[in-house]
Amino acid sequence: MIAERNFRQSGFRERVTEAILEMLADLPETQRNIFVWNHYRGYQPGQIAEILRCSPSEVEATLDGVNSILYRRTLRLLKEDPQLDAGTDLSCDVTPPEAGLSPSLDAAPLSIGVRAT
C-alpha cells in the first residue's frame, strides 16, 4: 500500500514539475526571473525590486500572478488524476477571478517590466 502511494506521488510530482517547466518557458524573461529568484534562489521581493529597479509591490503582484497560474495548472492535474480519492476536496478559498486574474497565461500577461536607468 505504501509503495503504491509513493509511486502515485512520484508520478504526480513529475507531472507538476513538467507543468512548472512549461509555465516558466511561456513566461517573459523578467517574470520568469522573478519566479526563479524568489522560489529557487531565496530572494525577497524587495531584493528583486532593487535588482530590477521597480517597486516591491510590482514584484509581489507578479509573484501572485505566476503562483496563481501554477496553482490552477496543478489543480487541473489533480482533477485529471484517475487515482484521486473520490472524497478529496479540491476547492480553495481564493479563485483567480476573485484575485482579478484571467485563467490563461496568454489572456492577461503580467505587467512588470524593467525600468530604464
Image (tube, helix red, strand yellow):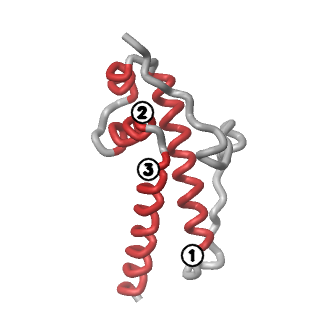
According to the picture, the residue beneath numbered tag 2 turns out to be 30
According to the picture, the residue beneath numbered tag 1 turns out to be 81
Extreme residue in the left direction: 41
Residue sitting nearer the eye, 115 or 82: 115
According to the picture, the residue beneath numbered tag 3 turns out to be 25
Dot 2 lies on which element?
helix
Dot 1 lies on which element?
loop
Please state the horizontal and vertical placement of residue 69, each as a whole percent of the image.
Answer: 56, 48
| Identity, as a three-letter code, of the amino acid under mark 2 | Thr
* Mark 2 neighbour class, 10 Å CA radius: few under 14, some 14 to 19, many 20 or more: some
Dot 3 lies on which element?
helix
* Mark 3 neighbour class, 10 Å CA radius: few under 14, some 14 to 19, many 20 or more: few
Q: Earlier in the sequence, mark 1 or mark 3?
A: 3
The residue under the point 51% across, 45% down is 67
Label 1 to label 3: alpha-carbon separation:
24 Å
18 up-or-down from 117: above or below: below
| Identity, as a three-letter code, of the amino acid under mark 1 | Asp
Label 3 to label 2: alpha-carbon separation:
12 Å
Please state the horizontal and vertical placement of residue 24, each as a whole percent of the image.
Answer: 44, 49
